[in-house]
Image: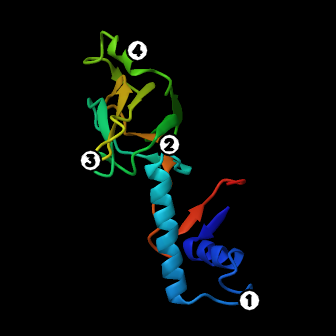
Amino acid sequence: VNITVQGMLIDILKVCKVVEMDEIPTATELADTLRTVNMMLNTLSDRNLMIQGTDRTGFSITANVPSYTIGPTGVFVTTKPHKITSAFVRDANGNDSPIDVTTTKDEYDSYDDKSYAVGRPEELIYDPGPAQQATPVGTVTLYPMPDGSTTRTPYLDMVMPLVEFVNLTDTVTFDKGA
């Protein structure tokens, strides 16, 4: 279900009977409701009850570089994901190849050829890092490390925290039943 932040806030105000069904909320009512919804999201996050969403994002990679930080200040700039559920890599011709995301860090650490194995990435290891971080970043490691034979873009399907709403005109997507 797609809805603008403003549409969602209007629905909240109508369900809570702050405004009548045919009434348009004032800018102050919308601003107050936005602030309240964002406070609720922060409270849910602080109590580890955060509502989660999913996101598929592609990232640029560099030949012979196996690991990338992911988060607001990472090489892959996005909100730090809770987990990565699936991934694929797209080559310059638009061909997609799956990437296994089930490899654990311990399994990866046991590989002997990490520093010289190059090619199309076939495995992805995600380390979200410590739970409490001043700057939330995780690490994505690709194996084998990408070669430079063709441009490749990995696409990651990530479970993301639902972050604060900023603009009333932004569109948000909720899964059915959310």
Judging depth in this view, the residue of 77 and 80 nearest the camera is 80
Q: Which residue is mark 1?
A: 22
> Which residue is the site of mark 2?
158
**Between discs 3 and 4, the one toward the N terminus:** 4
Q: Tell me what residue is drawn at x 48 percent, y 80 percent.
A: 31
**In whole angstroms, how far apart are the C-alphas of marks 2 and 4?**
21 Å
| Quadrant placement of the N terminus | bottom right
Q: So how many labels did they put on this image?
A: 4
Gap between marks 3 and 4, in whole Å? 28 Å
Residue located 50% across and 42% down the image:
158
Of the two numbered discs 1 and 2 on the same chain, state the one appearing first in sequence.
Answer: 1
- Which percent across, then down, holds residue 87? 50, 35
Q: Label 1 vs label 3: CA separation?
A: 45 Å
**Residue denoted by label 4:** 107
Looking at the image, tell me whether mark 1 or mark 3 is earlier in sequence order.
1
User: Which label sits on residue 134?
Assistant: 3
